[in-house]
Amino acid sequence: GFSGLYLPEFRDYFRRIPDLLRRMNTIIVHSKMNRDYVFCKQLGIPCEVIPNGIDLNEFVKFVIPGFRERHGIPGDRPMVLHVSNRKRHDLVFETAKLLPDMTFIVISNGEEQNPNIENVKLLSWLHRAEVVSAFFSADISVLTSDYETFPLVILESMAAGVPWVSRRCGNVEELPGGIVVDAKDNIPDHLADSILLLLQNSDFREQKSRDGISAIFQDYNWGKILPQYKRILCPRSAC
């Protein structure tokens, strides 16, 4: 990936890749904010921007009621959701310490060690339907990655109508429905402040929820995205 663009060990790789890319009819990138788009434009390589998206059927058919009950989370207690595998969970844990009256749910593949923080629950290898249900049960979702491209977890949060808080990574700045934290120091403090801002301002939170849902239906679902791929891959025939 382009996270290695300036690393010495990848210098030869990136020196050779433009010639390979020029043999393609076009390159598909997810956002004009991504490094691959800038890379292609600087070298005159044709590219098309097609966003990431979700399957809306998942967020209609796969919702299983009772997530909070199954995992011992009171209905009136704020729930903050983080879904990722080893993407700066340490920042989630430090943020949770600042907000002891909230429950932080971390869903991953099970490689993370239990931090032994009272208001943090680690859940691993959940069925996909249970992950979708977690989004619908959450009040806020949080993304703490150092690097992303076009994070699906943000789109999933938007589809569930859950406002999100994310560090500045990938293209999150062009996505509606949440707050982007642009901080290099005291990151947990900034994340906690943004979570509180959403939870303590119902009108603001509900507007973010509506903005996210609207964008999913308008732009970021496979019903909208698939025709864009077909236009490129099948310009003269039906497929």
Image (spheres, rainbow, N blue to C red):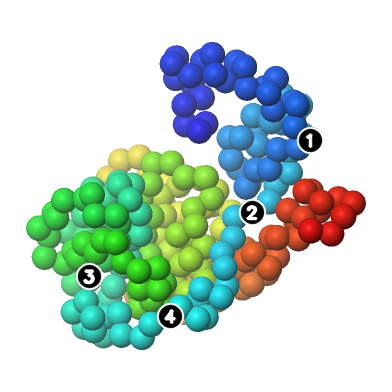
Give the SS element for disc 1: loop
Q: Is residue 189 visible?
A: no
Residue drawn where x is 60% and y is 42% of the image: 33
**Discs 3/4, front:** 4
Locate residue 215, reporting x and y percent: 62, 68
* Quarter-of-image position of residue 66: bottom left
Q: Which residue is mark 3?
A: 103
Q: Which residue is mark 4?
A: 63
* N-terminal-most mark, 3 or 4: 4
Give left or right: position of 189 versus 51. Answer: left
| Amino acid type, residue under disc 2 in the picture | Pro
**Discs 2/1, front:** 1
Other-residue count near label 3 (Cα within 10 Å), few / some / many at <14 / 14–19 / ≥20: many
* N-terminal-most mark, 4 or 1: 1
Give the SS element for disc 3: strand
* N-terminal-most mark, 4 or 2: 2
Residue closer to the observer: 213 or 84: 84
* N-terminal-most mark, 2 or 3: 2
Q: CA distance from mark 2 to mark 1?
A: 19 Å
Q: Which residue is mark 2?
A: 51
Residue drawn where x is 70% and y is 65% of the image: 224
Circle on res. 25: 1
Other-residue count near label 1 (Cα within 10 Å), few / some / many at <14 / 14–19 / ≥20: few
